[in-house]
Image (cartoon, rainbow, N blue to C red):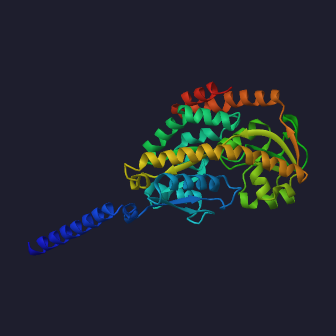
Amino acid sequence: MHSHSHSHSLSRRRFVQSTTAASVALACGLPGLARAQSPIALRFSSSLVADQNSAHYVWYQRLDANLKAAVGDRIRIDYFPNNQLGKESDVVQQVKVGSIDMMVTGSSIWATAAPQFGMLDLGYLFDSYAHAARALDGGVGARLNDILQKSTGCQVITWASHFGARSVYTRQPVKSLAEVKNVKLRVLPTPAFIETFKIMGAIPTPIPFGELYMAAQTGVVDGFEHDAATVLASKLNEVAKHCWLTEHLFSPLVVVMGKRGMDKIPADLRPAFLKAVAGATAQQRAIATDKGAQAVDALTRLGMVFNPMAKTERDAVRKDMEARLWSAFAKEHPATAPLFTAISAARV
C-alpha cells in the first residue's frame, strides 16, 4: 500500500513537473516543446546503394525533405541502404513483426506474402509508367493493399517508379520474336517472368544478379532482361552491346509499412506523414522518367545499340499474355480478375 502511494505520488510529481515545464515553454514562446517530445524514429530498409542512380534513395530523399518541411524533427527516418538490415526476403519478415518499420522494394518480393502481388510481374501488363500510375492510383493499388493488410497487417503506403522499363539485352543483335527464339536469357527469378519469356520463345535462365556479369561475359547466357539504369550502374553494357526495347515490365516500386511502424506515428501526425509520402512519389515518378531516358542516352554514348520492338509484335505478345498468363493467374487468384479489367481500362 505504502509503495503504491509512493510511486503514485512520484508519478504525480513527475506529471506536475512536466506540465510546468511545458507551460513555461509555452509562456516563453519557446519552440522547445515540440523538441521535448523525442522524435519518432522509423527504421527504413533498402537493398540498393544510397546514390542518385537508386530509385529507392531518390524516393527516400524526397520523403525526408517533405517530412522536415511538414513536421520538423517530430518524425525521423533512419535509412539503411545496401541490405544493411538483411536481404529483402528477411526484411519482409521483419517488417511484418515490426523490428523494421518500413522498406522500399520492387513489388515482387511481397508476392511471397500476398501471391496476388505476382500479377504485377506479368509481362506487358502495363504500357508505360504513366499507365501503371493511372491504374494503381485509380483503385488497383488500394485493392492490392487491402489484400496485403488482411494477410499480413502490413500496408503499401505508396506505389512509385523504377528508373525505366525492363528490356532485353543481348551479346548478339536480337530485334524480333523470330530472333529471340531459343536465346538463353537471365530473367528475374519469379514464375511470372519465366512464363513470360517462355511464351516469347526464349529460354529463361534464372541466376542470381550477382553472378550475371560473369555469366554474360562467359556465354553461360546469351543475354538478360533489366532496366537501363541498372545496366549502366552495373556496367553490364561491357558484356552485352545490344538492347531490344521490349519494355515488357513497368514494375512499381512499393514502400511497405508494418502495423507496428504505422502505430508509432500519432494520429495527429498521420495525415502530414501520408501527405509527405504522396508528395515524395509525385516528385520521384517525374525524376524516374528523366533518369530512365538519361540512362538510355548514356548507354548509347557507350556504344549500346537500341532496337525498338515493333508495335505489331508488342500487341501480339500482349494478347498472348492476356489469353494464357493473365487469365490463368486470375483463375488461380480470383480477387485479381477485376484488377486485370481495371488495368486494361486504364490504357490510353
From the viewer's perspective, is residue 348 above or below residue 87?
above
Q: Quadrant of residue 244?
A: top right
List the single residue furthest toward the front: 28
Q: Position of residue 118 (x, y in %)?
A: 59, 41
Q: Quadrant of residue 250?
A: top right
Q: Quadrant of residue 98?
A: bottom left
**Residue 199 visible to the viewer:** yes
Assign the N terminus to one quadrant of the image.
Answer: bottom left
List the single residue furthest toward the left: 1
Residue lying at 84% horizontally and 31% vertically, measured from the top left: 310
From the viewer's perspective, is residue 160 above or below residue 232?
above
The answer to whether 20 appears left or right of 215 in the picture is left
Residue lying at 81% horizontally and 56% vertically, measured from the top left: 236
Q: Nearer the viewer, residue 58 or 158?
A: 58
Assign the C terminus to one quadrant of the image.
Answer: top right
Residue lying at 55% horizontally and 65% vertically, measured from the top left: 85
**Residue 332 visible to the viewer:** no
From the viewer's perspective, is residue 311 above or below residue 28?
above
Residue lying at 51% horizontally and 56% vertically, measured from the top left: 68
Q: How many marks?
A: 0
Q: Nearer the viewer, residue 290 or 240?
A: 290
Q: Nearer the viewer, residue 200 or 230?
A: 230
Q: Nearer the viewer, residue 210 or 76?
A: 76
Q: Position of residue 254 (x, y in %)?
A: 57, 47
Q: Position of residue 298 (x, y in %)?
A: 84, 52
Q: Position of residue 216 (x, y in %)?
A: 83, 56
